[in-house]
Amino acid sequence: MNVKELRNQDVSTLNETLIKLLKKHFELRMQHKSAQLDDASKLGKTKRSIAQVKTIIRQKQV
């Protein structure tokens, strides 16, 4: 998702997005450990997306 799109969402939707990203990151980590993950850069991308969503949630709370 684009950062502009994330900023337009409310906190509850952002929390749902965060949960989905955390699950996806967990699955990617398990695939990486079992040598089934082809593109290891997906881990970094999901980690960055998680950080972006957490930052936007925090900004909306303040």
Image: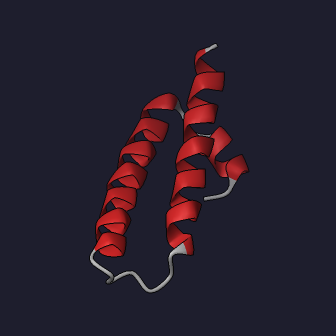
Asked whether 34 or 43 is in front, the reply is: 34
* Residue drawn 33% across the image and 57% down it: 26
Q: How many numbered marks does the figure carry?
A: 0
Q: Is residue 4 left or right of residue 50?
A: right
Q: Quadrant of the C terminus?
A: top right
* Residue drawn 50% across the image and 75% down it: 40
Q: Is residue 22 left or right of residue 5?
A: left
**Residue 16 percent coordinates (x, y):** 38, 42
**Residue 30 percent coordinates (x, y):** 29, 66
**Residue 32 percent coordinates (x, y):** 37, 73
Asked where in the image residue 54 lies, by quadrant, the reply is: top right
Outermost residue, right direction? 4
Asked where in the image residue 31 lies, by quadrant, the reply is: bottom left
Q: Quadrant of the N terminus?
A: bottom right
Q: Is residue 39 above or below residue 43?
A: below
* Residue drawn 62% across the image and 44% down it: 52
* Residue drawn 31% across the image and 71% down it: 33
- The colour scheme applied to this rendered structure is secondary structure
**Residue 50 percent coordinates (x, y):** 52, 47
